[in-house]
Image (tube, rainbow, N blue to C red):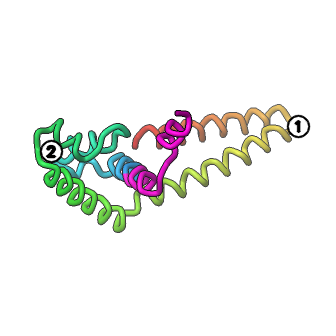
Amino acid sequence: MQNKAKEKTSITPGREKKLKRKEEIAELLEFYSGLLTKKELGVLGLYIRPDYSGAEVARKLRISRQAVHDHIRRSLGRMRRCESKLQLIANYKKNLVMFKKIMTKLDQCCAQTHSIEAAQALAELKDLFEKLVNRNIHQT
C-alpha cells in the first residue's frame, strides 16, 4: 500500500511538463493579463490552479474541453508574442539578480564600515534600495 502512495506523489515527466506550463502561464499572467478578455482570464485563472485540469475547467465554466484548449492556446500565444517583443519578464528577472548582488554588497559595506557617519549613510542607502526593490516586486 505504501508503494501506491509513493507512486501517486512522484512526478512523472508528463506531469512535470504540465506543471512547468502552468508556472509559465502564471508568470505571463502577472505581466500581461491586461491583454486578455474576461473569458480568457477566467479560463486561465482556473487552469493554473494545481488541482484543475482542462476537463475540470470546462466542467466548472460549462464550456467544452476544446473551448478551454482554444482559450489557453490563443491567450498563451498572445502573451508569448508580447513577451518576445517587450521582454518584461526577462528584464524583471535580470533586475532581481542585480538587486540581490547590490544588496549583498551593501551588507558587506555596512559590516566593514568603521566610521559612524559612513555606516549611517550606507544604512540609509540600503533602506532606500530595499524600498525600491519592494516597490518593483509588488507592482507585478
Residue tagged by mark 2?
39
Which is nearer the eye, 116 or 135? 135
17 left or right, relative to 54: right
| The quadrant where residue 113 appears | top right
Residue at image point 51% right, 36% down: 5
Instruction: State yes or no: residue 59 in magenta.
Output: no
Among numbered discs 1 and 2, the one appearing first in the sequence: 2
**Range of magenta residues:** 1-21
Q: Place residue 120 in its image quadrant.
A: top right
* Label ID, residue 114: 1
Q: Is residue 20 magenta?
A: yes
The numbered dot on residue 26 is none
Mark 1 Cα within 10 Å, few/some/many (few <14, many 20+)? few
Question: Disc 2 on helix, strand or loop?
Answer: helix
Locate the C terminus by quadrant: top left
Q: Nearer the viewer, residue 37 or 48?
A: 48
Q: Position of residue 43 (x, y in %)?
A: 21, 44
Q: Is residue 5 left or right of residue 31?
A: right
